[in-house]
Image: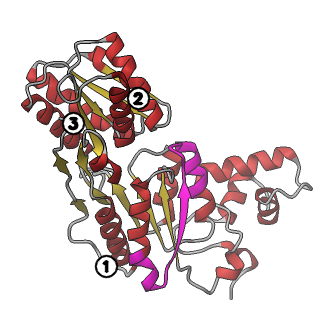
Amino acid sequence: MTSKNDKNTRTTGRPTLNEVARLAGVSPITASRALRGISTVAVELVEKVQHAAAELNYVVNPAARALASAQSHSVVVLVPSLSNLLFIETLEAIHQVLRPKGFEVLIGNSHYSRDEEENLLRNYMAYQPRGLLLTGFDRTESARRMVEASNVPCVYMMDLDPNAGVNCVGFSQLAAGETAAAHLLSRGRKRLAYIGAQLDQRTLLRGEGFRRALQQAGKYDPALELLTPRPSSVGLGGELFLQLLAAHPDVDAVFFGNDDLAHGALLEAMRHGIKVPERVAVLGFNDLPASAFMVPRLSSISTPREAIGRRAAEHLLTIMAGNKIAKPVVDMGFELQVREST
């Protein structure tokens, strides 16, 4: 016979409401009311329950009764931005793989905020998704523990971490930065700069790879790194490009952390009569569709965004079916597209 208190206990290994109540020193019904925000619960008890829930990485399950005998067919996909084509292509590929298999795709946009991503995870996990597709590895410790405690199948996209012991599909951001430096050095450039915005982990890793290659070549100057946490955009790229050249007129090559920044640089170069690549070479990253039509046509590192989304979704289907991935770390690589700007 099942006791009254056992109905809130599951065998999935996830933290339960009973465990939260026990840690907070209250009854399960009080814990439930506190987590649902019912005003009859004393403030001090609410704080105890919330602290216990955070310590156990417990997520409220508003659909628990409805889902008790049914299996969720949703997959949560979290990306840092929906403002450009970068992740739109990835999301479209994910949809094409998962929808025919009967899965609904729940999309969350973290706006490059670790705290916002944690909140999205906490809210979406309440609906017991069948799987997770997460972008990169840069998240809060609480979010990491939440994913691990949930036992929900998960695949990480866009970046690689061979030492993490997880399933990931992406490419080496470090290697991409090194390739950028090698290309510009092969063009005989002497004063090479890096301009990055948003400053998410992937942008910083590209810059680190670029820096390492320049250090090995004896060409690194820390004054030629221009980094800002401001959102990446065409306008910002033009602004930072002019700022860099004003401060360091001897710069003869610039690697931009994203193509939109490089687009802005090319537009300002045209406006101010700065010859590209004769005066300064410009190299972008991601190879957005517009890059091949800029004047001059932009050299860029092409990333397989659609292929990453497709492969990550296929791997998630395999894991959700209870099977292991033979090769958990999949390097999809990247390609240097050499055009007129370098």
Disc 1 or 3, which lies upstream in sequence? 1
Find disc 3 in the rendering and name its residue: 341
Q: Residue at x 35, y 31 (%)?
A: 265
Question: Of circles 1 and 3, which is in front?
Answer: 3
For badge 1, the amino acid type reads: Asn
Q: Distance of mark 1 from mark 2, alpha carbons?
A: 49 Å
Would residue 259 appear left or right of 61 to someone viewing this image?
left
Residue 272 place in picture, x, y as percent:
36, 22
Q: Distance of mark 1 from mark 3, alpha carbons?
A: 47 Å
Mark 2 surroundings within 10 Å by alpha-carbon count, few (fewer than 14), some (14 through 19), many (20 or more): many
Mark 3 surroundings within 10 Å by alpha-carbon count, few (fewer than 14), some (14 through 19), many (20 or more): many
Would residue 91 appear left or right of 172 to someone viewing this image?
right
For badge 2, the amino acid type reads: Gly
Find disc 1 in the rendering and name its residue: 323
Mark 1 surroundings within 10 Å by alpha-carbon count, few (fewer than 14), some (14 through 19), many (20 or more): few
Depth order, front residue of 175/320:
175
Would residue 269 appear left or right of 111 to someone viewing this image?
left
Snapshot quadrant of residue 246: top left
Q: Secondary structure at mark 2?
A: helix
Viewport quadrant of the C terminus = top left
Q: Residue at x 28, y 74 (%)?
A: 324
Depth order, front residue of 3/199:
199
Which region is colored magenta? 96-121
For badge 3, the amino acid type reads: Ser
Find disc 2 in the rendering and name its residue: 238
Q: Is residue 58 visible?
A: no
